Every structure is written in C-alpha cells, then in structure tokens.
Image (spheres, rainbow, N blue to C red):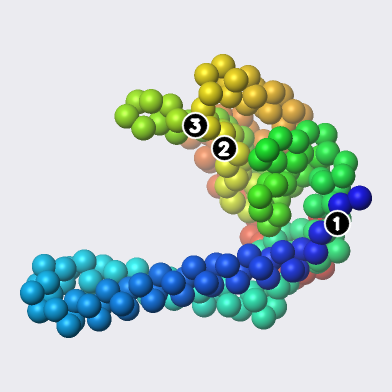
Amino acid sequence: MKNVDIKKYIRNQVISQITGYILVILLFFLLAIYVLLNESVRKDVCGLLIILSFFSLYVLYKMYDVVFILFDIEKHKLFKKFGCVNNVERIVLEAMNNFLYEDERIWITKNYLIFRNDYTKIVNLQKVLAIYGYVHSINITTTGKGIVLIDEYGEEFLIYYPYIPFYTVKKLQRLFDILLPLCPKAHVGYSPKTLRYIEENITPLNLNCNEKS
C-alpha cells in the first residue's frame, strides 16, 4: 500500500516556493545594481526598474505568507478546507489505493478529486458549484483542452490536457460522464447564471483545523 506524509510534502513544496521567490528578488537586485552602476543604460530602463520594484514588493508579500506556513503547516488552506493532517492523509491515501478513475493528471474517488502532481489540490466533489469545459488556443489553433471545477470556497481547479484531435475530446467526455453524477450541486457550463449561482453559494473558509469533510 502506498503511503504519504502530507506535512513533509507541504513543507518541501513551501521550501521550493520560498527558494523561487528568493531567486526572483535576487535577480531584481542584481539588475538594479547593474543599472545604477551604468549611467548609459539608466535612463533607458528607469521605467522598467520601477515596474520591477513593485513586482518585487509583491513577491515579498507572497513570500511573507508562505514563510508563516513553513513554521505552522496546519495554517495551509488545505487543512482549513478538509480538517487536520490525518483527515487529509486519509483522503489522499484513498485516492492512491482505491480510485474510481485515474490518468496521468488526476485520481477520482467517490467523494474527491486529487491532482497527482500536487496533493494540496484536492476537490470535494460534493461541494463543487460549477463544472465547465476549457479551451486554450494560440492564433486560433487549439493547443489544449480541459475541465474547470469551482468549489464552494470559490477556488478554481483546472484539469488540463494537451490537445490531440479526437483523443482529447473523447477523454474529456468520459471525464464529464464520471464527474457529473459525483457533483450533485454543480451547475454545468460557463454562463451568467452559473456565475450568479457561485456568488450566492460561496462559503468562507473555516479557520479552525478540526472539521471533518
């Protein structure tokens, strides 16, 4: 039987995020130093430097939030949505070992959808408010298709697949056929009616970490 340590998984994920933020900030400071020391390019990139300054402040803000999670893993929104560590690990283990459907992107169980490449992306299918198709195109050429799910907390989850004619459409139709009966509250399709339904039914996240889903 497979096993998972969700705290260790999240800790490693957060450390990777912090490392990325630090690298971005470091690159900005190196660029700023280069510009300040080279008068010939200072005037040409002054506007860009101001924009990058605001971007760096945004990165610092995001890193601030992530650092707090590193010191208290249970502050992660995953536990606000699904309860404490044992409950989340049970959900992931059920998906790994007792799924109704799996492919290279996801596992689906009777109650949950879990992304294989990111265990922090778990969807409670009983709380999905909307489900609709997604198409990505470049210069009118379709490059990918997928399915979007929006849960009662307003979070969007995209299941995305590179577009292969006929194969991808057939795969997504099968996914819709599996998901729709498992999502009793979901409105199907993207429309003003669906958006109103979502707005009327969004629920704030529970800040306590003791609720079972």
In terms of sequence position, does the residue under pointer 2 or pointer 1 come before the other? 1
Nearest to viewer (mark 2 / mark 1): 1
The residue at the point 58 percent across, 24 percent down is 168
In terms of sequence position, does the residue under pointer 3 or pointer 2 come before the other? 3
Question: Distance from label 2 to label 1 (Cα)?
Answer: 26 Å
Asked if the residues shown at circle 3 and circle 2 are in contact, with their CB atoms under 8 angstroms apart, the answer is yes
Q: Nearer the viewer, residue 142 or 154?
A: 142
Residue 170 coordinates in the image, percent (x, y): 63, 19
Nearest to viewer (mark 1 / mark 3): 1
Tell me if residue 96 comes above or below residue 209 in the rendering.
above
Residue type, label 1: Asn
Question: Distance from label 3 to label 2 (Cα)?
Answer: 7 Å
> How crowded is the residue under tag 3: few (<14 C-alpha within 10 Å), some, or many (20+)?
some
Residue 202 coordinates in the image, percent (x, y): 62, 51
Q: In this image, 170 relative to 95: left or right? A: left
Tell me if residue 100 comes above or below residue 51 in the rendering.
above
Label annotation for residue 144: 3
Label 1, on which residue?
Answer: 3
Q: In this image, 157 relative to 102: left or right? A: left
Residue 125 coordinates in the image, percent (x, y): 74, 42
Residue type, label 2: Tyr
Q: In this image, 79 relative to 58: left or right? A: right
> How crowded is the residue under tag 2: few (<14 C-alpha within 10 Å), some, or many (20+)?
some
Which type of secondary structure does the marked residue at label 3 adopt?
A: strand
Residue type, label 3: Gly
Which type of secondary structure does the marked residue at label 2 adopt?
A: strand
Asked if the residues shown at circle 2 and circle 1 are in contact, with their CB atoms under 8 angstroms apart, the answer is no
Label annotation for residue 160: 2
In terms of sequence position, does the residue under pointer 1 or pointer 3 come before the other? 1
Q: Is residue 200 at all visible to an observer of this figure?
A: no
Q: Quadrant of residue 74?
A: bottom right
